[in-house]
Amino acid sequence: MMTLSGTTLPIGSGLNKIRDMKSIRYLYKIGKGPSSSHSMGPQRAAELFRRRLSQTPRTIEVELYGSLAATGKGHLTDRAILETLSPLPVKILWLPEKTLPLHPNGMIFRGLNPSGEILDTWEVYSIGGGDLLDKEGPVAISTSYPEYEFNTAAEILRECEQKGISIPEMIRSRESADFYDFLEWIWKVMSDAVDAGLRSEEPFLPGGLRLARKAPMMYRAANENIDFVRNLNLVSSYALAVAEENASGGTIVTAPTCGSAGVLPGVLYYFHRHHRMPIKSILDGLIVAGVFGSIVASNASISGAMVGCQGEIGTACAMASAAAACLLGGTPMQIEYAAEMGLEHCLGLTCDPVAGLVQIPCIERNAFMAVRAVECAMYSLATRGEHLVSFDEVVEVMNQTGRDLQTKYRETATGGLAQIIARRKFPGITTTG
Ligand code: SF4
């Protein structure tokens, strides 16, 4: 059983593994922001609970624990549950001081009949990226997607080397005929989110911080600059555009989460538009990124509440680094090296969202990590891809580091930037239940 704050688990013990590696289709989920763990996961749990009930309840009680309760209001957790269960009467209890045993994002749903008797109770956890876990194990989304028989980057590199194939070829051989339709759909939603964020005329993001949308101005700045600075501004503007759409409740793709959803599209959009990368290459980039994101999700965690921001934005950086290395023609080893650097240099990154909103530091962090991902790819391709620390090892270290982080640095909005800025007063902001 996983435990929470301050727990030390032996690296490589396997105790932290929460699921086998499934199709990368599980990683990319289309939905509305701002949070995959705090809005998409609870929304899905509410839908499933409603379907579990054998009769219409008089009322549904929902208890939110730990991080879900601490930052749920800023992340619109209550709105996601209420809208999903509407028009049923729902009572939400916020319990930020308590946690359930399997994960910091615990929920208990309880349906009551007209005489107040309990029809059904469901203890369920939102474990990141919109995924759910209950006492029986992972809650399946679809049984139609394939499972891969490997779980680590080492296994992937070995097969690519033995067969002389690329990572996209290896994954394609395990997927069904409609795989590229799925990828095209994901790419369309990602690029639409970039376009929407760049076009937005809303001066401020919702939530009460009065944080300005910066993607349009960053894009304008790019066109006033040249060469290196222009390229930095462009990559940043595309990543910002998606992150700001997410913060506004717009439609995005988890990559691997909502809060980190801007990094990968920012990089892919840049290469597609400014380096004339064809769609087929972009889709291969999505495959490679999905593989490295799935390795983290299946061996560690992509949940900020579990391991801090290194699991969200660090994984997004690894995914985008791998995708960029693939687009630039990297070998499997160079791609793995780029991904390793993307995650390694985010180790220890805390999650301390100001006012519990997915805005500060989240939005800028997407832009910076998109730029860093391009750097990781270029760095790797300047070498033969040989390196001492493997991606799998960095995933283990990230997992252990995350569990060593104090709870206040794991999406509770009680430490770091959140604590400092909480001294100021912002109208209309309530950070906890
Ligand atoms: S700080 Fe990172 S992990 Fe935390 S909400 Fe923001 S993007 Fe997600």
Image (cartoon, grey):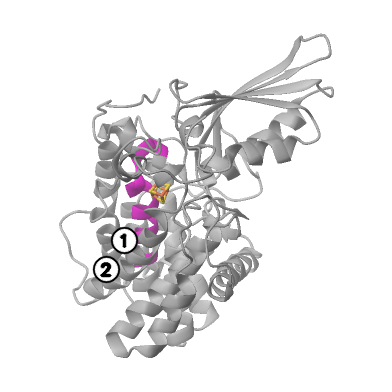
Q: For mark 2, does the 10 Å Cα neighbourhood hold few (<14), some (14 to 19), or many (20 or more) residues? A: many
296 is higher (above) or lower (below) than 381: above
**Which part of the image, by quadrant, shows the N terminus?**
top left
Label 1 – label 2 distance at C-alpha: 8 Å
Measured from the top left, where is residue 58 in percent x and y?
81, 20
Would you name the residue on which mark 2 appears?
376
Tell me what residue is drawn at x 42 percent, y 43 percent: 425
As for residue 309 lying within the magenta part, the answer is yes
Amino acid type of disc 2? Answer: Cys
Q: Is mark 1 within 8 Å of ligand 1?
A: no
Q: Secondary structure at mark 1?
A: helix
Q: Earlier in the sequence, mark 1 or mark 2?
A: 1
160 is higher (above) or lower (below) than 237: above
Q: Which corner quadrant of the image does residue 189 belong to?
A: bottom right
As for residue 377 lying within the magenta part, the answer is no
CB atoms at circles 1 and 2 under 8 Å apart?
yes
> Quick one: which residue is furthest to the left in this view?
388
Measured from the top left, where is residue 404 in percent x and y?
25, 33
- Region rendered in magenta: 305-321
Q: Secondary structure at mark 2?
A: helix
Tell me what residue is drawn at x 71 percent, y 18 percent: 120
53 vs 420, left or right, is: right
Would you name the residue on which mark 1 appears?
339
Overall secondary structure of the magenta stretch? helix
